[in-house]
Amino acid sequence: MDVTTQLFDAVQAMMLQWGAYFIVFAIIVGFFRTNWFKGKLGEALVNLAAKLRLDKNTYHLIKDVTLPSGDGTTQIDHIIVSVYGVFVVETKYYRGWIFGSAKQKNWTQSVYRRKYSFQNPLLQNYKHVQTLKELLGLDEHQVHSVVVFIGDSQFKTQMPANVAYGGAYVNYIRSFTTPVLDVEQVEMIKQHIQSNALARSLKTDRQHRDHLRDKFASTSTAAAVTKTAEMTNTCGKCGADMKLRTATRGANKGQQFWGCSGYPKCRNVMPYNAN
């Protein structure tokens, strides 16, 4: 074997070795960029802020809780129980500029001049709050909704006091200084949440995701049915509204039907199904 062949084999072996390293590196980078990892990172940062800035003897952190609800399950990132109330914390990992207000159905994320719409996280957290209130038998003033944004994001509109970036959410929690629960109630609430929470497992997560998927599909189907119903009340010829009328003569006398409101210019009719 000549020197050239040996050199070629050595270079080839090196390329194969570095190629394997590159593949492993690419897989690791890809994993770090997944939404799942970003979500878990955000939750870890929220947990760390609570442990560092909230007195553990006063504020009790319960993480990653899945509770049964009326139509399936609801998953809560963090629950902080204290004599000052129960704080239900929802974590969101976003980048770019964030626009929104308390009552808007959807908020906007702007990244490099591209805009994306996402559900108002306060509305999303509303179900979590309601589930806990019903489970624990608490009043409105005893349960508080908190939303925390993590990631390279920046608020571009005035946010409600209970929406914060990073560890600043702790300031909102600490702003409550009037006790609304006693120490015994706090202990009972902790035990009640833990005893009702589903076991942490891949199966629990999968069942919750399946529930959300089925709920979304059901909502989409209902919206499609509603849209179809609205379309049937619109004239297919001229676009005017269809009005419910009753035949006054002929073989169909006394029967109802949809007639175009543009009559007599448009004489389009459609059958009426009372069912």
Image (cartoon, rainbow, N blue to C red):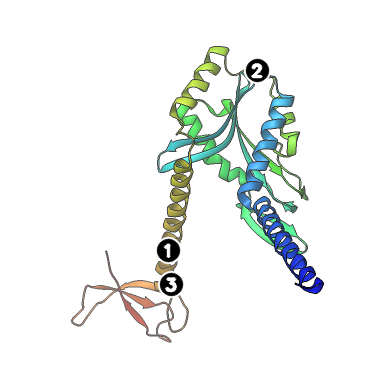
Using residue 160 as the reference point, say whether residue 64 is left or right of it: left
Q: Callout 3 environment at 10 Å: few (<14), some (14 to 19), or many (20+)?
A: some
Q: Which residue is outermost to the bottom?
A: 265
Residue topped by disc 1:
226
Residue topped by disc 2:
58
Quarter holding the N terminus is: bottom right
Tell me the residue at 68%/35% (across/down). Answer: 46
Which numbered disc, 3 or 2, marks the residue closer to the eye?
A: 2
Residue topped by disc 3:
231
**Residue 211 at what x, y percent from top left?**
43, 48
**Residue 157 at what x, y percent from top left?**
76, 49
Q: Are marks 2 and 1 in contact (CB under 8 Å)?
A: no
Using residue 60 as the reference point, say whether residue 219 is left or right of it: left
Towards the viewer: 107 or 21: 21
Residue type at numbered disc 2:
Thr
- Work out how far the residue at label 3 is from the one at label 1, CA to CA, in angstroms: 9 Å
Residue type at numbered disc 1:
Thr
